[in-house]
Amino acid sequence: MRWMWVDRFLALKKGAYAKAIKNVTLAEEHLHDYSPYYPMMPAPLMIESMAQTGGVLAGYSDDFRHEVILAKIEEATFGDPVVPGDQVTIEARLLESREEGSRVGCRCSVDGREVASATIMFANLDRSKIGLAPEGNFVFTEELVQLLRVSEAAEAETP
Amino acid sequence: MPDREEILSKVTASLVDALGVSEDEVSPEASLTEDLGAESIDFLDIVFRLEKAFGIKIPRGDLFPENLLSSPEYVKDGKLTDGGLTVLRVKMPYADLSQFTENPVVSELGRLFTVGMIVNYVADKLGSQAA
């Protein structure tokens, strides 16, 4: 299974904002594993969707110079369950950023209704310090970069 | 410029939010790691919160120095050498080293990162900004 919890990026503004979507389908087996007889998107995977959206924003804002690692979830709230057929819109805003890491505020919504939110801290790791070649990419794999190309995410005005 | 008590109050609030501890656990003598359970990522969180709370910029390594003991000559038999202590004084000017220098065991270095050290740093930073 590919560990991609974002289907498409709709907006990506360096240093500011990202918006992506995740479509939830009945065909996703983990929904049934998590909640038999009432399949729903697991809360931890909603966190992962927010982390991937926010992580791409943080990495892109840093010109992908570091590996961006989810380091701390400061707070997270969850509302109504997210069920098959829902399209989750994930928005991330870069709250603070330094060379060592960043803080991102994230929000998930379905049809404009907030269903989850989280404030996530990311740590920036030097590739050389974790045994990777300078041009190597552990977090921002070709798969993730391809997702951005396919999405043709464009600079968008921060709402 | 806020006085030391005001600075301590704001530092306490920042640490309560960053570390999820209660206010009464945060005393000037409390060690961030040993008493308040801070981990490495928490140090970045603390820096973010202090910058916001006090409107200051904290350059990397200023408050929480990195690579403290970068040379093997600074440590011998698990204790800092005189050379190591000299480097420590330079890199951690806001820490209270008086007790540590009596028995400078490397494993006790974490105890130097205290709430009081943060207060000293912020007070100095605000003072130099006002000057």
Image (cartoon, coloured by chain):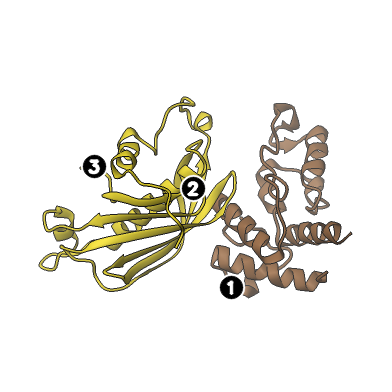
Chain colours: A yellow, B brown
Task: Judge depth for marks 2 and 3 and give the one in front.
Answer: 2
- State the image coordinates of residue B130 (x, y, percent, origin top left): 86, 62
Relative to A109, is A45 above or below? above
Q: Quadrant of residue A147?
A: top left
Q: Tell me the amino acid under the disc marked 2.
A: Lys
Residue situated in front as seen by the camera: B67 or A13: A13
Would you call the spot at circle 1 few (<14 residues within 10 Å), some (14-19), or many (20 or more)? Answer: few
Q: Are marks 3 and 1 in contact (CB under 8 Å)?
A: no
Which residue lies at the image location 73% right of the left edge and 63% below the top edge?
A: B29
Which residue in the protein does label 2 denote? A14
Relative to A129, is B54 above or below? below
Quadrant of the image for the C terminus of chain A?
A: bottom left
Which residue in the protein does label 1 denote? B22
Which residue lies at the image location 27% right of the left edge and 73% below the top edge?
A: A80
> Disc 2 to disc 1, how far (Cα)?
37 Å
Q: Earlier in the sequence, mark 2 or mark 3?
A: 3
Q: Is residue A152 left or right of residue A29?
A: right
Which residue in the protein does label 3 denote? A2
Chain letter behind tag 2: A
For residue B97, the mark is none
Q: Tell me the amino acid under the disc marked 3.
A: Arg
Q: Is residue A59 left or right of residue A35?
A: right
